[in-house]
Structures are given as C-alpha cells and as structure tokens.
Image (cartoon, rainbow, N blue to C red):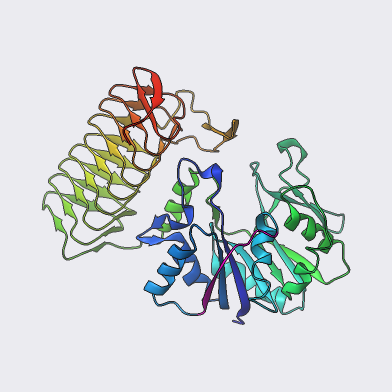
C-alpha cells in the first residue's frame, strides 16, 4: 500500500470535558499508553509522523518515543499564533512539506479500513479528502451539510440536536495533497471565535479544487467524555483472543479463569476467584479470595481485596478495593475504596444516564454507567455512589455517604456537607 508522506497527530489539548480524568492520551490500554499505540499504528501508513504536543506533555511523549526506540517521529510544541486546531497545524509550518493527513490523537479507529479507502481517493489526485461517519444519536461535533448532488456544501459546527443538517459527523481525518493549500488561508480568513480551522475548511470547500469525502462505517471511538474510556477499553479487550498468563503469576488451583484473559507478571490470585474474559490484569496485582472480575481492565500494583466484584470497569494503577462492587466504572490511579462501598450503575427506571458537563446535562447514551473517580481519591466504608456520578481528584467521601451528585476536586464530603479537603 502507498504510504502517506506526512501524518500529523494532534496531541496538544486535554479537554475539560474529560474531567475528573486527565491526561487522556496517556491512559493505558492493555498496558500501553494510548498515544504510544497511536504513533506505532500510524507509522505503518506514513513515512513521517509529526506529533503536535503541548508544553505540558511534550517531554512525556518524547520520553515514550525514545524509550521505545521509535524512529521517523518528530515532536513539535504547539505555538500560540492561532487558537485551537489552527494553532496546532500552523506550528508545523516549517517542519513538514507536501501531502499531510491530519488526525486526532484521542480518536481510535480501524486504521487498515479507513486508510485503504483514503488511498484509493488519493490516487485519483484529489487535493482535499474528508471523512464522515453517520450517527443515529446526537454527537457534539461538526456536521456535513450536503447538497442535492451529495457534495459537501459546508461544515456546520456543533449545531443543536434539532438543527443538524445531516446525520454525518465530520471526523478529524483530513487529507491535503499539499499542506500549503491549507496554511495560506490562515492569514486571509478572519474570525472572532476559536474556530479558524473550521472557517478555513469551509473556505476550501467553496474553492474550485478537486475534493471529495467518504463515509467511514467501521469502529470509531473518541475520548471526549470520561465515560468514553469504557467504550475504548471494550475495543481493546476484544483484541484478546486467548489466555495469556505469565509464568511468574501465582494462581490458586481453586480459582476459575474463563475465556480470553491476559494476566501479567507477579500477579497473585487467591482461592475461589473467578475471572471472565475478555479481561486484562496488569503486573503485581493481587486478587483476594472469593472475588470476581469480568470484562474489565485492571492495571498494575492493585489490591482487589476478598469478596470484591469488578464488572465491565476500567481500574487504573495502585488502586485498593475491599469487599466492593465496582460496575461499569472508571477508577483512575491511586483510588482507595473502604469495605462495602459500592457503585450503582443502573437507574430504577432503566432510562439512559445523564451527566452534567460544563453546567449542561449530557446524554451519555448509556443505560449502565457507574462512577468515574479521579486520581488520589478515597471512598469511605459503606458509601454508595449513584449511577453516573463523577468524583474529582484528591477528594474524600466519608463513611456511609450516599453520593447523588458530582463532587469537585479536593473536596471532603462528610455528613452530607462538602468542605475543602485540606488534608491532601
């Protein structure tokens, strides 16, 4: 297959919509940070991968690349000449030339399928190629406005649910035969909002150049909201096809392991434990007697205490559980649960779960969603966390609390009253 000269991987931002989680590009799936997985995959299809990073994550990305001895990658820190995506792209003005494919670092796709379709259109000498995906449910993104001839007239950014011009959402998977075709408009087009790239794209769509688009109908997942970690986790788990158990692990003869499961180095699994795949358990984790783990990812250095159940959940590193139920939840690193604390994951009425993001209720499109808990937080004994509740980092939930609403960072919730957590 023909390789693309430049692939530009956008990795500069960390959306506030991802709260209480952070550093989404460094979330680990099957033991590998997402950004490293993306770089390795795109190098299969591009001659050079350029990562546009922020000042806060550039060093960490470079360290990952160097430690894994990856070649044909350059890392550029995003500059501030222009806001948003336009600023990221303009930052590489003097670093890449010729054709470029612009992709989002936090979007997971079926690389082989989408790039095969793209290359067919590249070979037809198209100067601009866009990719869309049809959504039945509302998605907060840019939508294609199509004319009678099915050609793209315009991209409408984040219309309201009842004013969507089509069901086709634009993916960040934009091909330009020459990056200068895009860059020259940055100084010509004016806008008062943080949408210069989108305005430039609409300008290009009105120009007399050979352009086209196609509908991508395979897997796609974006880490836009924190609950998207679960859908991305499920995709990675489906890649586990058989049991892979480290020889250094210690597994009780009384434990039961069913289906495709990966168990890392020095893992200890006690009596009468049941693990149902697809499941991933990272290095140095201990699973106590009478526990159950199913369809989940459990990271490294965790203690899953006796009589705990983890179902369809993402568990980070250095997490401590004891006699807990954790269902359809995301627990970031260094989270601790006291005995008998549980996460509710299903509303009595069975309706989809809403989540408040930037003071607006967002439909998660999920009937089951447990808790999402930021790093370094502690949940007291006998506490109950209601479906879809988000708890910020460095927050403590006192014993016996019933947590119905989101809890901000560095908060101490005790006796129903929220205080600043001055002990962290």
Residue 68 visible to the viewer? yes
Nearer to the camera, 301 or 278: 301
Which residue shows up at 22% across the image and 31% down it?
Answer: 339
**Residue 318 vs residue 87, the one in the foreground:** 87
* Side of 182 where 241 appears, left or right: left
Residue 147: % across, % down: 86, 54
Quadrant in the rendering for residue 121:
bottom right
Q: Where residue 213 sits in the image (x, y, percent)? A: 74, 64
Query: Residue 241 versus residue 302: which sits nearer the camera?
Result: 302
Q: Is residue 198 above or below residue 381?
A: below
Please state the horizontal and vertical placement of residue 419, each as a whole percent of the image: 39, 24
Q: Residue at x 79, y 55 (%)?
A: 199
Residue at x 47%, y 62% (from the top left corner): 35
Q: Is residue 381 magenta?
A: no
Is residue 76 covered in magenta? yes
Q: Where, by quadrant of the figure, is residue 137 drawn? A: top right
Q: Which residues are magenta?
A: 72-81
Image quarter in which the N terminus is found: bottom right
Number of numbered markers? 0
- In this picture, residue 153 sits left or right of residue 368: right
Give the vertical position of 395 relative to 252 (above or below): above
Q: Residue at x 72, y 80 (%)?
A: 123
Residue 239 is left or right of residue 52, and the answer is left
- x and y, in percent, of residue 146 in the image: 81, 54
Is residue 46 visible in this depiction of the protein?
no
Which quarter shows the C terminus? top left
């Amino acid at each position: 297959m023909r390789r693309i000269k430049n692939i530009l991987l956008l990795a500069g931002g960390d959306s506030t919509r991802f709260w209480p989680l952070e550093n989404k590009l460094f979330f680990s799936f099957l033991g590998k940070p997402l950004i490293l997985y993306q770089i390795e995959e795109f190098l299969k299809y591009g001659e050079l991968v350029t990562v546009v990073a922020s000042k806060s994550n550039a060093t960490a990305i470079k360290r990952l690349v160097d430690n894994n001895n990856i070649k044909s990658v350059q890392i550029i820190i995003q500059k501030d000449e222009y806001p948003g995506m336009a600023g990221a792209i303009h930052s590489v003005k003097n670093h890449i030339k010729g054709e470029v494919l612009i992709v989002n670092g936090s979007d997971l796709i079926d690389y082989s399928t989408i790039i095969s379709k793209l290359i067919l259109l590249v070979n037809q000498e198209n100067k601009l190629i866009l990719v869309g995906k049809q959504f039945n449910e509302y998605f907060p993104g840019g939508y294609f406005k199509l004319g009678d001839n099915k050609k793209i007239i315009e991209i409408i950014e984040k219309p309201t649910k009842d004013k969507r011009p089509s069901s086709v959402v634009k993916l960040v998977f934009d091909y330009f035969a020459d990056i200068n075709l895009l860059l020259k408009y940055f100084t010509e087009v004016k806008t008062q909002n943080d949408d210069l790239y989108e305005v430039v794209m609409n300008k290009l769509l009105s120009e007399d150049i050979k352009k086209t688009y196609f509908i991508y109908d395979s897997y796609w997942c974006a880490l836009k909201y924190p609950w998207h970690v679960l859908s991305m986790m499920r995709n990675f788990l489906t890649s586990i096809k058989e049991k892979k158990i480290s020889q250094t692990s210690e597994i009780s003869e009384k434990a039961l392991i069913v289906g495709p499961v990966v168990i890392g180095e020095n893992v200890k699994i006690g009596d009468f434990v049941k693990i149902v795949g697809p499941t991933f358990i990272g290095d140095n984790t201990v699973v106590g007697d009478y526990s159950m783990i199913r369809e989940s990812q459990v990271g490294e250095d965790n203690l899953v205490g006796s009589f705990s159940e983890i179902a369809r959940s993402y568990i980070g590193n250095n997490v401590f559980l004891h006699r807990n139920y954790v269902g359809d939840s995301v627990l970031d690193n260094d989270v601790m649960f006291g005995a008998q604390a549980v996460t509710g994951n299903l509303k009595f009425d069975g309706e989809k779960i809403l989540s408040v993001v930037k003071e607006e209720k967002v439909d998660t499109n999920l009937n089951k969603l447990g808790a999402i808990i930021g790093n370094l937080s502690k949940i007291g004994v006998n506490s109950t966390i209601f479906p879809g509740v988000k708890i910020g980092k460095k927050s403590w939930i006192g014993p016996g609390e019933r947590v119905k609403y989101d809890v901000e960072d560095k908060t101490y919730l005790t006796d129903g009253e929220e205080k600043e957590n001055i002990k962290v």
